[in-house]
Image (cartoon, rainbow, N blue to C red):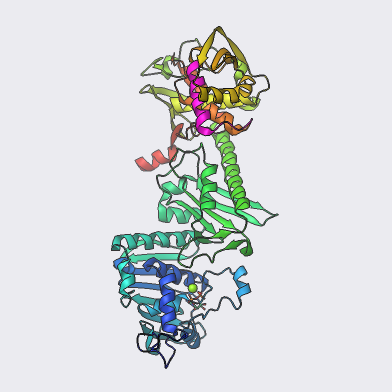
Amino acid sequence: MQRSDPASNNTGFPLNMSSIRILSDRVANQIAAGEVIERPVAVVKELVENSIDAGATRIEVEFRNGGKSYIRIEDNGKGMPPDEALLCLERHATSKIREAADLNEVCSFGFRGEALPSIASVSKFTLRTRAKEWDHGTEILINGGKMIDKKDCGMPVGTVIEVAHLFNSVPARRKFLKTDPTETAHITYNCRLFAVAHPNVAFRVLENGRTVFQSPACENLRDRIAEIWGRSLADDLIPVDVSDPKTGLRLSGLTAKPGVGRSTRRELVTLVNHRPVDSRTLSLAVLDAYHGRIQKGRFPPAFLFLEIKPQEVDVNVHPAKREVRFRDDGAIRRFVLNAVTETLAANRADDIAQTIAPPPVTTPKAPVAESRTSKPAPSLLRTTPAVKVEVLPTPSKAIRPNVPPATKATTPGWRLITLLKKRYALFDTERGLVMLHLRHADQRVRFERISNEFKNDTPPSQRMLIPHPLEFEPLASEALKSQLKQLNAQGFQIEEFGRNFYRIEAVPTWLSPEQAESFIRDLVDLVRQRGGMRKHTALGWEAVARLAVEGSYRRSDSLTAQAVEQLAKDLLNCNTPHTSPLGKPTFSEVSWSEWERRFGSD
Ligand code: ADP
Ligand code: MG
């Protein structure tokens, strides 16, 4: 709104440039608009937030040309009586806070009372609103911050705001806008985020008269995600709900099953007190929790709501951006990392309980892996009996991981159908058809065995028939020397017998003696890259174990049906069975219900 200022001309600038004056509200609004309303999506964001603050259960967003020529937001919220309709367009008019101290406690979205006057100062702006106590609404028309008209109008309870010709009067700002499709993408993405943040609000989004998406009010988050992102993503998510009564922190929502990764971060959505935010702290914590559970460079889809005391978070960082600042970043990081890690671990237990359900009595019994040399049952290997596949045979008893007796005794509900392409094994299970990736599965099993070995006080070791000499250049030699003590405590026996000369006397049983030298050389490279393993930390040994399964430290072996079934069993006994230690999926399942869906029910 314009405040009459005798010293200003029509441009809003003071006539006498040398004297200090207070800016007219119109100019202040236009300047604020530059901050708050960087681009059309910011208008949509401010207006939708206002609608949500007003208690709307139905919100419709319509826009044209990426929002540059037209934006309309319609809601069925509480609306405003005529005096408030006028007041809300005044600078710093807000119903949401009274004092600066309240800023620490704000739970509503807007709190500056800046959005509406800013938007109105740089567009052709129409507000129509009606509160339920009134039998008519109020319509106000503003152009470039100047009020053109105000009148009564008939309308249902709620608010409709139209914003046309955004930035027409501010060509400098218009120049910075991106192409229509880019601005459109920002608007639709943000509307999707709002829809996820508020599943119980019905949303409809229209672009150039065409519905981009719509979703009725949903009972729960999963339904909402299925509506907006599709059922298959929704089915790939598991529920999270972890609270810490001490700090009042709570993390809830849905997060990717292990092995489920996407090529972009777009579906890694974090919200703080129901506000979608971009937070490095949060997304790094989530990524950390998936370390080794999804492929490197991919992102887990997740929709995670963090609840936190308002005074512990600053949402006031930048009006137009979605950044937040936590008072105690480290504590938030740890809480989120633990919450997601715990959820993934617990889910694994559930999953396996289902997977190892005994097979129905009518089906043929899977062969028992009593002897590794016995011939495979022919019926189980219809197409390729005993193909040669590069998989290490199950190592000796001495280095089997500690398997709980209950699961050990059970036959997994996975029945081997056949091996395919020398790389896969197809299984028939209670829940569907499972394709096992032999190499990834083998890597996971060996990785966990080796990792378990490192926890062992006296890891089994094998002597080399002839000690193997090794020479290193000085820096590499230093690196090896720094690790000798730890390596020798873990089943290696490597002696230094001269300047930069070493002798391998023994290696752990998981490493084949022929490969001892190349393994040690790779290990030295790893130590040099990482700047040394941290003493006795799981991290250091994990890196060693990963190295051990990743390279060529394997023996070729013919793969029998028994060996494949044993591999599947061993895999299901792993702590993280869904992915290889390098984050690749170990198996993929197509459920019976999915087959039914594909063929259609009769
Ligand atoms: P803020 O949201 O920071 O308070 P705004 O400029 O966005 O500032 O809005 C100013 C005031 O106008 C709000 O505090 C609210 O009282 C009122 N208002 C805005 N939009 C709506 C709406 N859709 N329904 C009801 N009241 C609204
Ligand atoms: Mg607002």
What is the chief secondary structure element of the magenta stretch?
helix
Q: Where 196 sits versus 95, above or below?
A: above
**Residue 525 or residue 102, whichever sits in front:** 525
Residue at image coords 42%, 44% = 262
Query: Residue 306: x and y, percent?
Result: 57, 56
**Residue 537: horizontal and vertical position, in percent?**
62, 33
Is residue 458 in view?
yes
Question: What residue is at 48 percent from the left and 61 percent from the top?
Answer: 322
Magenta span has 524? yes
Q: How many marks?
A: 0
Residue at 57% from the left image edge and 46% from the top image edge: 340
The one nearer the camera, 167 or 220, is 167
Q: Is residue 159 visible?
A: no
- Residue in front for this viewpoint, 528 or 293: 528
Question: Which span of residues is magenta-colored?
Answer: 517-535
Q: Is residue 413 left or right of residue 455?
A: left
Up-down relation of residue 334 to residue 219 (above or below): above
- Magenta highlight on residue 231: no
Q: How far from the left and from the top, in percent, is residue 480? A: 56, 23
* Viewport quadrant of the C terminus: top left
